[in-house]
Image (spheres, coloured by chain):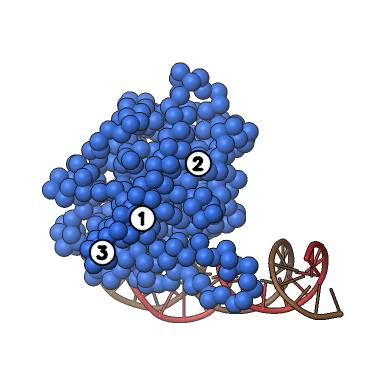
Chain colours: A blue, B brown, C red
Amino acid sequence: MLQQSELIFDYASDHINMSQVGGHSEYPSVIVEQVPHPHLLSFSGLACEQLQTEDDPQQLFEVEPCESGEEETMETLVAADSLLNMDCPDTLSLEQHYSQTFLPSLADVITTPVTQVTVSAGGIVGAVDQSQWHSLHMKKPAAPLQSRKRGRKPRHRRAESPTPDIIVKKDKYNKGGNTLYLWQFLMELLQDRQVCPRYIKWTNPDAGIFKLVNSKAVARLWGKHKNKPDMNYETMGRALRYYYQRGILNKVEGQRLVYQFSSLPKDMIYITDGDGSKEEKDDDHDDNSDNDEGMSDDSDDSTVASSDQSVEEEDLHPPQKKTSSGSIQATAPQRTRPAPRPSGQRDTVLRPASSSLIQENHLPIVSAEMLRTLQNLQKVQSLQPGGHASVFKTAELLGSLCERQAAAEVAVNSRSASEAPDKKSHRGQKASQVGTPLLVPPTSSDQ
DNA sequence: GATGGCCTAATTAGGACTTCCGGTGT
DNA sequence: CACACCGGAAGTCCTAATTAGGCCAT
């Protein structure tokens, strides 16, 4: 049975060989992700109602112990935690971090099945139809046969506005392109202790509202990621404004630099102000703290490439590395996202609600911290089983997870086949339809 | 030689910004 | 005055789909 709090190595189980982890000098082959996700459970045919009650949002994170045990999960988290806190040999700067190693760095280790990392935002602001996502995957089994034929295929239309049909294919990142979308980038920043809440922070995680504490710094990071040295907040802001039309972002009126995601993955890592990093006010505003702002915007523009990096390194790494507990706090207790409220209950004045939302399937769940884990994972080799054996346990967990997922899928399929069509619940359909692609690598299920 | 499958490179279409701009509000 | 914010318009970049051509096996 899939447990909500279990860590998942994004499909990587089929493609990683732990021995290769060490062999690969730069990029380990595992994505560690926690999936506290009822939607996932529904994919696997599990009754997530058992885990989440609308009356008690807290129950979202209450999972019944599985055979692997709650302790194991926690141990795994601790292991990842430890990894995150290991010193990085390369001392990645933010610049490096977001411009180079972000997602493209996974190229060597994550292969096609990792593509469509999907999470559900169901229930957050509104449910989104999954038919497209479904059709994408459900057609897969037939695809190989047709691909042999040379005939003209119906042209696949990419996501277009205003429908927020953003398909995040991670294999894009394997091609060296910087195709991390801006909204993804912002989400990543919001999950990155190095910049959150320092440069960007949640003001109302519940509603997906965040503030660009240091708009110029964020813009510069974005520009570095996109290899646009001239990027500024004005330009980035234009891109953000395009998101209004597409229903990805809303502007929180009356508050400068405050935006709201229309939808969020439930397993976002919410870094709060108290998480260790000092918030840094935008130097354009009321504060006098452009001191430690390595990106002191007006002064360093001429030396963006060098000074930014250096200052960021010295500026960002030391304080964030250590929290009070000496660990990254992106663990379950912090990932408290109360049950979503209807949009009408938002306490923030928003623009006229867009008709559409971020397609729940397309939200990123690979956080920057997870990626740091990847980058540090090479150190796993040097870990003593007694010390960080949980890392390996996690790998095992993944294997069993896939097995369980496959078993669950079979169960769901058989169940749904036996049910009368009119009695099929929507949830049940969803589970049977999209469960497979999410957790079971197509390579194993389609062949 | 004809046919069909596979592979690769070139072309094309389209999405996601980026850049620039003029304007308004705080 | 500086800055945030808005949205139109044109352009760039990148990716995936399509197409054409070459190679090879039957």
Q: How far apart are labels 3 and 2 at the CA level?
A: 35 Å
Q: What residue type is labelled 2?
A: Ser
The relative height of residue A246 versus residue A404 in the rendered view (above or below) is below
The foreground one among A114 and A106 is A114
Q: How crowded is mark 2: few (under 14 residues within 10 Å), some or many (20 or more)?
A: many
Same-subunit check for callouts 3 and 2:
yes
Q: What residue type is labelled 3?
A: Ala
Could you say which disc has been placed on residue A420 in the image? 3
The relative height of residue A309 versus residue A147 in the rendered view (above or below) is above
Quadrant the C terminus of chain A occupies: bottom right
Residue that lies at the very extreme toward the left in this rendered image: A55
Q: Is residue A116 left or right of residue A283?
A: right
Q: Which of marks 3 and 2 is in front?
A: 3
Q: Are marks 3 and 2 in contact (CB under 8 Å)?
A: no
The disc numbered 3 marks a residue on which chain? A
Could you say which disc has been placed on residue A13 in the image? 2
Q: How crowded is mark 1: few (under 14 residues within 10 Å), some or many (20 or more)?
A: some
Q: Check disc 2 and report its element: helix, strand or loop.
A: helix
The residue at 37%/71% (across/down) is A163
What percent of the width, then of the height, locates residue A403?
43, 42
Q: What residue is disc 1 on?
A: A413
What percent of the width, then of the height, locates residue A181?
45, 58
Task: Point out the tag, 3 or 2, that comes first from the N-terminus.
Answer: 2
The disc numbered 1 marks a residue on which chain? A
Task: Point out the tag, 3 or 1, that comes first from the N-terminus.
Answer: 1
What percent of the width, then of the height, locates residue A342?
18, 59
